[in-house]
Image (cartoon, grey):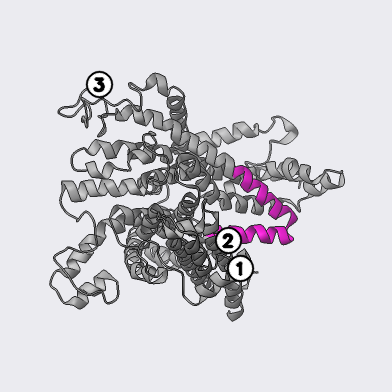
Amino acid sequence: MSAFIVRRLLLIIPTFIGVSLLAFTLIHLIPGDPIDLIAGERSVSDERRAALEIQFGLDKSLPEQYLVYMTNVLRGDLGQSIVTRTGVLGEFFARFPATIELSILAMLFAIVVGLPLGILAGVRRGSTVDHVTMGVALTGYSMPIFWWALLLIFLSSVTLGWTPVSGRISLLYFFDQVTGFMLIDALLSGQRGAFASALHHLVLPAIVLGTIPLAVIARMTRSAMIEVLSDDYIRTARAKGVSPFGVVGIHALRNALIPVVTVIGLQVGILLAGAILTETIFAWPGIGKWMVDSITRRDYPVIQGGILLIASTVILVNLTVDVLYGVINPRIRHAD
Amino acid sequence: MTVAEQAPAQAAPMPPERGAEAPPHPLREFWSSFSANRGALGGLIVIIALVFIALLADKIAPHAPTDQFRDALLTPPAWQDGGSTRFLLGTDPVGRDILSRLIHGTRFSLMIGVVVVTLSLSVGVFLGMLAGYFRGIIDNLIMRVVDVMMALPSLLLALAVVAILGPGLVNAMLAIAIVVLPQYVRITRAAVMNEVSREYVTASRVSGAGVARLMFITILPNALAPLIVQATLGFSTAILDAAALGFLGLGAQPPTPEWGTMLADAREFIRRAWWVMTFPGVAILITVLAFNLMGDGLRDALDPRLKT
């Protein structure tokens, strides 16, 4: 088992170096002079330019610059935002909890709704329930989620007045951010109604972000269920007189869940891609909105650092999923 | 036991004994399997309709997509109070006919699909073929780059590419083509590795076929099924991602009647004019759904191993 983990750990090193190269190259691929980009719109005098070049190490060769960049990255220095003049790493961690909170709720929604639907469709294969569920799942999967968000805002917030249009909590509440997770901070603040308000603000964004994972999980669960139900051991269990519920719930589900767990893990990349759109629409102050804002403002150090940090997150989560998968499924662990 | 005695037990795949009837032509077999899937057939019909709409956009659309009717700003759809049959689906904030813009938008969405799929498919197949055929260093190099690309959420990678190239429809298409490239590389590589040790490939090699012939004429046709499925599904990814970029203001720029771009500032009119934000989304959903339905049907018909 430990050999398996070490092998997986070694495999991520080249990926991480590749991602850092990509992030590093980004700033050099952009048309125009890096100094002009760093200095923004203002024109720069020749002496100032020379000073800036030395300050940012741009007078060195590209490999040297990359080494300097990597040394800084490993020290936790990802540079400064051109716009706010604050450190990129600090900005990332200030926004990351908002994205995690939203993603966890979205994933919960997707699993709680998608898993039972998939099981039901798989067990009742070919029935009306199956057709309707899969039709809805395919529609969810085909949904442009930014439009889905607009539609839900229109129905739930504008027409029915059920949910807030944007933000993380009502402006009535004001308290210090302790953990960065609004739900936890609201509870810690002890203010009446704060938690409910934070949860209320989470409903629509979580549904929007969870829709595609929900569809994927439902489809995956269904096909895993169908495959497992046709196995010999299920027939044996049935022949032994195990109740239908026992066959599905105990015998089939455990094996059917193996591919589903992987799929759930692989949704992290999809969640982060979806977060870019969802956060922009709901003015949710997470890393997705941060990236879009930085791109429109041409804040290149932030884009560069953000790409590195987000990719590292995805790599780490995928690694965890891989290892967990090896724990659940010995066949993977021992295969090359 | 003779073959004839065995045949009934094995049923379908065995041709009838004594060669009385030829097996059905592969295309006919494919069609009977594909057309039995009602969803896939529906998807195909919608796609054909969309192609015609795109080709005949100038003839069908009641108005030019950029004509601004200053006397009819934010006119509701025809069936609502204040609507007029002149603008069936209403007008947008600067008085352009939404129906006409949607009809012309079909051209952009289909073109985005064609360009992105052609680009990513051809480059992806080439790289995947190199990796799967030669293995070794080339394979390692290509697959490590693919790993890096897969570590980035698709839309973020597309955003990064657009950040480098600048916003616009052409750059957005290029960005999406780069983002979806890894899928084609991986599929081709897996298929080639599966085929390359087969006897027909060895036979072709000993009879003197060159590397290029082996790769693209001998092996590739046998690796096509999963690629065709992926390419069909690739249309929906391309259309969705291009619309998302347009929505964020980083794809096609106004006044281009691209569906995502049409939604870019629809949020402001959500309270006063629901039709501005509704119809472009419906158009995207129908188109993407049609390609996904057809892709699922193709997968079932072409590649029984992937059947779900």
The residue labelled by disc 1 is A14
Q: Residue A265 occupies which quadrant of the picture?
A: bottom left
Q: CA distance from mark 3 to mark 2?
A: 53 Å
Q: Chain of mark 2?
A: B
**Residue type pointed to by label 2:** Asp
The residue labelled by disc 3 is B86
Residue B249 percent location from the top left of the image: 37, 45
Q: Are marks 3 and 2 in contact (CB under 8 Å)?
A: no
Give the magenta-colored segment's residue range: B121-150
Q: CA distance from mark 1 to mark 3?
A: 61 Å
Q: Main secondary structure of the magenta part?
A: helix
Q: Are marks 1 and 3 in contact (CB under 8 Å)?
A: no
The residue labelled by disc 2 is B147
**Residue type pointed to by label 3:** Arg
User: Badge 3: how crowded within 10 Å, few (<14), some, or many (20+)?
Assistant: some
B258 or B235, which lies in front? B258
